[in-house]
Image (cartoon, rainbow, N blue to C red):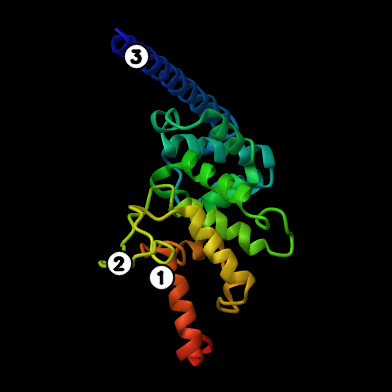
């Protein structure tokens, strides 16, 4: 009877979660339509319809003018995010996380300029970014190292969809050296790069990379221990390769 009670409780909880997700989906659908209509209301009648060409100077003038209005650009970014991520997918994310991202136009803009999160998983990207900021003693706290914010954001965007990890075929006895995780841990990857950066192990131009460029630095499928080992071996045996 206890087992039946537990099954009944689990089914009730599952139904509550499903109902909440359904409600969130409806709310996001409603929100994206409000945003769409708000944006359409700003477009002059002369620019409406399908007759506008890419060479139309008036259309570009309109966009340049609107881009200077923070409220308009924030509305556009929120519309793009919900429309791209899809209400069905957003409903599976923590609504508080989504709300914090929608209320942060600067961070949202940085995400979009860097080509957005993998598979449009804005909720997961925000969760990863916030976890990195919590775990790091520097990221988001030390203005002298803005590269670490961009690094954290790049990792969050790339790993919004888990990256399968390619592990060594033969594991050493101590897991202290090599990981056997199924996917790359984004927080551990960030901390690995943060440590290497603070200790001067990375390329001197690393700090000038944009968030979009950093995506191609942190998207590897190797364990972080392999990266650390590679940097150490280069310094020990081929230091000239580091600076060439």
Q: CA distance from mark 3 to mark 1?
A: 45 Å
Q: Is residue 25 above or below residue 118?
A: above
Residue 101: x and y in percent read 58, 38
Within 10 Å of the Cα at label 3, are there few (<14), some (14-19), or many (20+) other Cα atoms?
Answer: few
The answer to whether residue 15 is visible is: yes
Within 10 Å of the Cα at label 2, are there few (<14), some (14-19), or many (20+) other Cα atoms?
Answer: few
Upstream in sequence: badge 3 or badge 2: 3
Residue at (51% x, 90% y) in the render: 239
Foreground of the two, 170 or 186: 170
Toward which corner of the image does residue 208 lie, by quadrant?
bottom right
Identify the element where label 1 is drawn. Answer: helix
Identify the element where label 2 is drawn. Answer: loop
Residue 158: x and y in percent read 44, 54
Residue at (39% x, 61% y) in the render: 175
Residue at (50% x, 65% y) in the render: 213
Compared across the picture, whether 139 is left or right of 187 comes to right
Disc 2: which residue: 168
Foreground of the two, 88 or 49: 88
Q: CA distance from mark 3 to mark 2?
A: 42 Å
Upstream in sequence: badge 1 or badge 2: 2
Upstream in sequence: badge 3 or badge 1: 3
Q: Is residue 85 above or below residue 34?
A: below
Disc 3: which residue: 6
Residue 226 bears which disc, if any?
A: 1
Foreground of the two, 110 or 190: 190
Compared across the picture, whether 94 is left or right of 17 comes to right
Q: Nearer the viewer, mark 3 or mark 2?
A: 3
Residue at (54% x, 31% y) in the render: 40
Identify the element where label 3 is drawn. Answer: helix
Do the residues bearing badges 1 and 2 touch, measured as CB atoms within 8 Å?
yes
Compared across the picture, whether 186 is left or right of 183 comes to right
């Amino acid at each position: 009877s206890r087992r039946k009670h537990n099954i009944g409780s689990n089914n009730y909880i599952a139904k509550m979660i499903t109902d909440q997700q359904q409600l969130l989906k409806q709310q996001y659908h409603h929100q994206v339509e409000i945003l769409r209509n708000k944006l359409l209301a700003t477009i002059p009648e002369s620019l409406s319809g399908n007759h506008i060409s890419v060479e139309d100077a008036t259309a570009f003038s309109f966009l340049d003018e609107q881009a200077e209005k923070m409220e308009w650009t924030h509305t556009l970014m929120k519309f793009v995010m919900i429309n791209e991520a899809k209400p069905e997918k957003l409903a599976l994310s923590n609504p508080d996380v989504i709300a914090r991202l929608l209320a942060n136009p600067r961070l949202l803009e940085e995400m979009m300029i860097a080509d957005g999160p993998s598979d449009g998983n804005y909720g997961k990207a925000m969760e990863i970014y916030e976890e990195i900021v919590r775990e790091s003693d520097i990221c988001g706290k030390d203005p002298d190292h803005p590269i670490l914010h961009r690094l954290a954001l790049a990792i969050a965007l790339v790993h919004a969809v888990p990256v399968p990890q390619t592990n060594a075929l033969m594991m050493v006895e101590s897991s202290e050296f090599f990981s056997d995780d199924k996917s790359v841990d984004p927080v551990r990857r960030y901390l690995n790069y943060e440590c290497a950066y603070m200790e001067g192990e990375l390329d001197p131009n690393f700090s000038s990379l944009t968030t979009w460029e950093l995506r191609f630095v942190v998207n590897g499928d190797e364990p972080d221990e392999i990266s650390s080992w590679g940097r150490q071996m280069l310094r020990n045996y081929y230091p000239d390769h580091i600076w060439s």
